[in-house]
Image (tube, coloured by chain):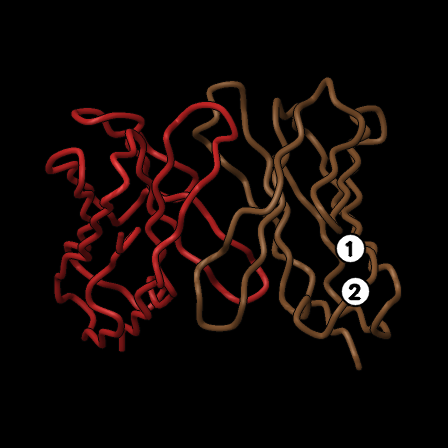
Chain colours: A red, B brown
Amino acid sequence: NAGVTQTPKFQVLKTGQSMTLQCAQDMNHNSMYWYRQDPGMGLRLIYYSASEGTTDKGEVPNGYNVSRLNKREFSLRLESAAPSQTSVYFCASSTGTSLYEQYFGPGTRLTVT
Amino acid sequence: SQKIEQNSEALNIQEGKTATLTCNYTNYSPAYLQWYRQDPGRGPVFLLLIRENEKEKRKERLKVTFDTTLKQSLFHITASQPADSATYLCALLNTGGFKTIFGAGTRLFVKA
């Protein structure tokens, strides 16, 4: 099993450009999440999808959109990138029950200039 | 607003000693508290979950305590090894288990 995969691993954008971060999991998990991690601030939840067909805002949703394409895939879109969105983005998945254990992908390092 | 505090300073200990990391929180009543390990350049890895009605949880060399009155969790690694060197994150979850709040983490260095 590959677990949680993310593409791309690195990306540099100019202010105003758009892009989509892709995430896929092969563990048949119901729930998926997008976080950003900035130095000294810890992981902050952007959006989550409790189950296929549903999405909800997290702590810092402004400037982002998400799509739960199917049970396996959950994408994050930046419509008009800003320097404040420079960060490391992590996707995670979980069964949504029991230990609520989240499995994280390797991350995407995004720089907006 | 909800806030989680972990020791921002790195913790340096000698191999074989017990490492104790602290997680304090305010303005929140979590149903669950989790601890994760994160190595440089990688995503966090789940270690333990403790529920609000549990005082203590153990897993191998790891022990977590949860005091909802003090709003504090302590994370212990006994007989620490250099391989335990990493950043450890505390996370709080609400009843649904979806909206997770993470602390900034504490960096642990274990010297041989």
Vertical relation: B17 (above or below) B35 = below
Q: Residue at x 82, y 56 (%)?
A: B78
- Left or right placement of residue A101 versus residue A19 in this view: right
Chain bearing tag 1 is B
Q: At label 1, which amino acid type do we have?
A: Ile
Residue linked to disc 2: B80
Q: Is residue A27 above or below residue A15?
A: above
The percent coordinates of residue A93 (x first, y second) are: 34, 41
Query: Is mark 2 in CB contact (under 8 Å) with mark 1?
Result: yes
Q: Quadrant of residue A32?
A: top left
The chain to which mark 2 is attached is B
* Left or right, A63 with reference to B99: left
Of the 4 image quadrants, the one containing the C terminus of chain A is bottom left
Q: Which mark is residue B61?
A: none
**What amino acid is at disc 2?**
Ser
Vertical position of residue A52 compared to residue A72: above or below: above
Residue picked out by circle 1: B77
Say which residue appears at 77% left-offset and 43% top-offset.
B63
Residue placed at 61% from the left, 28% from the top? B32
Check disc 2 and report its element: helix, strand or loop: loop
| Residue in view at x 51 percent, y 72 percent | B40
**Residue in the foreground of this view, choosing between A62 and A98:** A98
| Residue B27 percent location from the top left of the image | 68, 29
Disc 1 crowd, CA 10 A, few/some/many (<14, 14-19, 20+): some
Q: Position of residue A95 (x, y in %)?
A: 37, 30
The residue closer to the viewer here, B78 or A52, is B78
Q: Whole-percent x and y of residue A18?
A: 12, 61
